[in-house]
Image: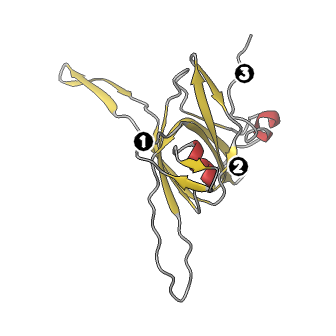
Amino acid sequence: MPENKITFGLKNVHYAPYTVAAGVITYGTPVRLPGAIELSLEPRGDMTEFYADDMLYYSAANNQGYDGTLSIANILEQFAIDALGEELDETDGVLTEKATGKGKPFALMFEFDGDVKATRHVLYSCNASRPTVASTTKTNTAEPNANELTFVAGPRETDYAVKTKTTATTTPAVYDAWYTKVYEKTPVI
């Protein structure tokens, strides 16, 4: 199958909370985050340069993942609980953000459409900061508000994997199951 010449669009955003115990990462079932508007990923890490003999003697990239921004129609309550550390009071149905609340790590999955086939991605180790809260008054038209979620997608601590994506040669079994669980390479025995 030929490769995409271009990519466009954003859809099928999912997150999967995870835990780490005894050096093993266990991902939860992916949960859909509807209403994705825009996603941007800026590389983290500087280029390391070393000069000797009056010239650039050595250079190497330092991959520390990405700084991400996800614009989304609405932050789901479950995401606020799972990833932002907010607490839901089951007795009165009130969601509370506390100064002592701790965000929890998650994997982020999404896809960009292409001229041939959509490319599916997973960022393995994300931590989000609290989103900006804002709104504007209605005028003669009602413009929906967007929420902006900023996050850091860093290397996974077990194998330093940052991001994986599908290609033109990805098997149908892997491609079709992308949003049922977080993709992890099956070890060769």
Q: Amino acid at mark 1?
A: Thr
Residue 19 position (above or below residue 141): above
Tag 3 residue: 186
Residue 49 position (above or below residue 112): above
Crowd rating for badge 1 (residues with CA inside 10 Å; few <14, some 14–19, many 20+): few
The mark that comes first in sequence, 1 or 3, is: 1
Crowd rating for badge 2 (residues with CA inside 10 Å; few <14, some 14–19, many 20+): many
User: In 3D space, how far apart are the residues under numbered discs 1 and 2 (Cα atoms)?
Assistant: 40 Å
Crowd rating for badge 3 (residues with CA inside 10 Å; few <14, some 14–19, many 20+): few
Quadrant location of residue 144?
A: bottom right
Q: Please report the residue visible at 55 percent of the width from the left and 27 percent of the height from the top.
A: 161
Tag 2 residue: 118
**Can residue 65 be seen from the camera position used here?**
yes
x and y, in percent, of residue 165 in the image: 64, 38
Residue at the outermost right position: 173
The mark that comes first in sequence, 1 or 2, is: 1
**Can residue 6 be seen from the camera position used here?**
no
Q: Amino acid at mark 2?
A: Ala
128 left or right of 53 in image? right
Q: Please report the residue visible at 61 percent of the width from the left and 53 percent of the height from the top.
A: 77
Tag 1 residue: 100
Q: Amino acid at mark 3?
A: Thr
Name the front one of labels 3 and 2: 3
Residue at the outermost bottom position: 140
